[in-house]
Amino acid sequence: MMPPHEARALCLLPDRAAVLAGLRDRKIGATALRELLESSEERPRQAWSGTVELRDGQGRRTDMAVRVPRTAGRRPGVLVVLHGAGGSGEQILPHFAALGERLGLAVLCPTAQLPAERSNNLDVAGLFGSRFRMPRWDLSGPDFLPAALRWARTTLDADPDRCVLAGVSMGGLATWNMGMRYRHSFSAAVPVNGALSVWESFGTDERTRALLPNTLPLPLFVVHGSADEQIPARFDRESVETLRALGHKDLRYEEVAGGGHGLETLGLEPDSPLFTRLEEWLAGAQRTAQPDEIRHRADEDRHGRAHWVEAGGITPGRAAEIHAVRTSPGRIEVEVSGARRVTLHLRGDRLAPGDTCRISVNGTASPVRFTPDLPTVVDSYRETADPGLVAEQIVHCAVPER
């Protein structure tokens, strides 16, 4: 059997037909491949730092500052840091380098670029969003953040279950928003001097705030300066209060007395009390890739997925809600509203080939025979390069009318 890192590299070769032929020649089936993709092995990794070119899902290019710690066998984790307006990856990296070194996390700091299309996206720019022509993060789309994660998994062979997201100011906004939409990609999130949306300067952003419960399973360490005049602390304070009322189980809020909007005013330098608390909190951060229960809201199909369940055909202007529970290895119950279809990404860690999985969507049950499929494993891995999101069988279910 080939080493896990070689299996991951093989699956990503451009010629899909050759990939499948190579796996079949080695008699590697769907379940064996999925297990290989998830496996790790002890091998030394050298420290290095530099700048790499990164390309996002829209074909845009940017520079990404990188610092990788030396690890004596264990795969490195990842800390992606998103800078604020007017900043760059190169400027923000030194502020988080020590954190990455101590925790065995590769620190990746991409630089934001102008959006691919001119739009009236006000999430960053406020009232004059259409005139905001500075580089910015796309708060809900295929920006440089997922590209950075993919680069880390494929180039560094990084641990996909130890991927932390952090961001400052505009990057803090992106951290909240990406955490709400793609929480299954992260082990923890650290928004600093951020907010859910600058729209909230003019009143509650109901559309964005409706997605806030998606972060309930995501460990959060929220930092805000009490004297921040650009993005007032009350925005983060309100979000934290909402999540605490909803029962968030791993949420820290640090409001720095007298701290301003600048990162240097927050006391996050190495060995400071706040740095130490963050370091100790992050040390145990680990993603649960296959939870038995999932609750998720989405207002667009492109972020309709959470772990192994996905809502599609979402009604425009309305957030779809999905509640999926694996009540036993062979039974899944789904309740969904605001969407026309449900997609399930099934895996052999709970089912054996030939098992019947009984899937109930809004009370309508259907038996599905579990049939692992090698091309499905390869294609699902090629899509994200995240073994935790790999499927051996994909099942589409229409949502019955109530």
Image (tube, helix red, strand yellow):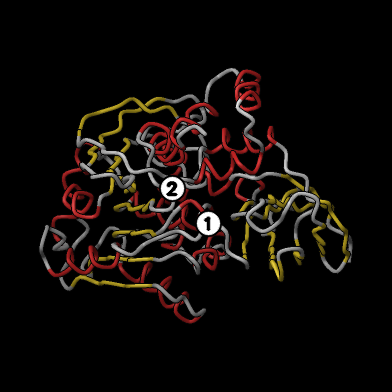
Q: Which mark is residue 289?
A: 1
Callout 1: helix, strand or loop? loop
43 with respect to 332 (left or right): left
Counting from the top left corner in percent of width and height, residue 349 is at 63, 55
Q: Can the viewer see residue 331 in this picture?
A: yes
Q: Can the viewer see residue 336 in this picture?
A: no
Q: At 50% from the left edge and 67% from the top edge, which residue is drawn?
A: 217
Q: Quadrant of the C terminus?
A: bottom right
| Residue 390 drawn above or below residue 364 | above
- Residue 31 sits in which quadrant? top right
Counting from the top left corner in percent of width and height, residue 152 is at 38, 37
- Label 1, label 2: how far apart the Cα atoms are: 9 Å
- Residue 28 sits in which quadrant? top right
The residue pinned by badge 2 equals 160
Q: Nearer the viewer, residue 391 or 314?
A: 391
151 with respect to 210 (left or right): left
Q: Earlier in the sequence, mark 1 or mark 2?
A: 2
97 with respect to 121 (left or right): left
User: Dot 1, how many residues are within 10 Å of its Cα: few (below 14), some (14-19), or many (20+)?
Assistant: some
Q: At 54% from the left edge and 64% from the top edge, which residue is drawn?
A: 214
| Residue 97 drawn above or below residue 224 | above
The total number of labels drawn is 2
Q: Amino acid at mark 1?
A: Ala
Q: Amino acid at mark 2?
A: Pro
Q: CB of mark 1 within 8 Å of CB of mark 2?
A: yes
Counting from the top left corner in percent of width and height, residue 113 is at 37, 32
| Residue 39 drawn above or below residue 269 | above
User: Dot 2, how many residues are within 10 Å of its Cα: few (below 14), some (14-19), or many (20+)?
Assistant: many
Q: At 38% from the left edge and 53% from the top edge, which residue is drawn?
A: 162
Callout 2: helix, strand or loop? loop
Q: At 72% from the left edge and 53% from the top edge, which residue is drawn?
A: 352
Q: Nearer the viewer, residue 31 or 90?
A: 31
